[in-house]
Amino acid sequence: MTRSFSLLALIVANLVPLAGVLFYGWNASLVLALFWVENLIIGAFNLVKMLILAARAMRLNELFLCFFFVLHYGLFCAAHGLLLWDLLDLGKIDSSVYFGDVGFGLLELFAEGATVLIGFINLHGSLIMIGILALSLSHLVSFIEHFILRGEIFSLTNRDMMARPYGQVLAMHAGLILGAVAIDKFGSTAALLAVIVGLKLLIDFMQHARRHKLNLKQTAQSS
């Protein structure tokens, strides 16, 4: 019974962009940007879980895993955000406008990724914030239901959490890139955008079922 709450929240959250496309004229840039931002939401919740698990373990190496996750996952999302911005042909990214001169290397890539996020929010305003709120609430429901109430906090480790987001995120990234290419070729039609949203919902549903079925087995084995 309780599992249905997170699944229902997931469906409702994905119906927000679908309704936006079908009834309110949401365009390709807004939809694809929203799904990219969801990667950041997934990473943020994963980091919160890792920090909680690190606090439970009370070991310094657990905090190092948290730092490594931020570094690796953050760079991964930043690189994809830059690629998506370029595919959508939204102009040049200038991180110095917001972050000054951060030099070169990793800091510059992080700054450019943050600039992409700010750029999408500035470009789409309250519309993208509605979508971000819906997706954030969906992940919050899943966090409470599965991590807290269903006991994942006692069965998962930070080594599990390091790799956990990548199955869903890699599928989403591949879908976003293919969607951007399809939109570039066929144009930003409502029908095509609705198909992209529908496929994304299907991926989310499958990943949700696989991930939490596995976690229930892990909880049963540990008890």
Image: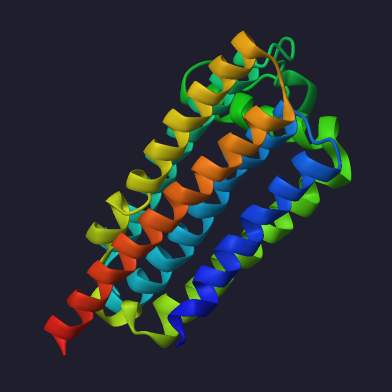
Residue 189 in the image, given as x and y percentages of width and height: 72, 24
Residue 158 in the image, given as x and y percentages of width and height: 28, 62
- Give whichever of 57, 142 is nearer the camera: 142
Residue 79 left/right relative to 101: left
Instruction: Examine the image and state in which quarter residue 35 appears.
Output: top right
- Give whichever of 152, 217 is nearer the camera: 217
Instruction: Examine the image and state in which quarter residue 96 appears.
Output: top right
Residue 8 left/right relative to 68: right
- Give whichever of 163, 9 is nearer the camera: 9
Residue 179 in view, yes or no: yes
Residue at image x 65%, y 66%? 137
Quadrant where the image shows the N terminus: bottom left
Residue 53 in the image, given as x and y percentages of width and height: 34, 72
Quadrant where the image shows the C terminus: bottom left
Residue at image x 44%, y 79%? 3
Residue at image x 35%, y 60%? 63
Residue 82 in the image, given as x and y percentages of width and height: 58, 21
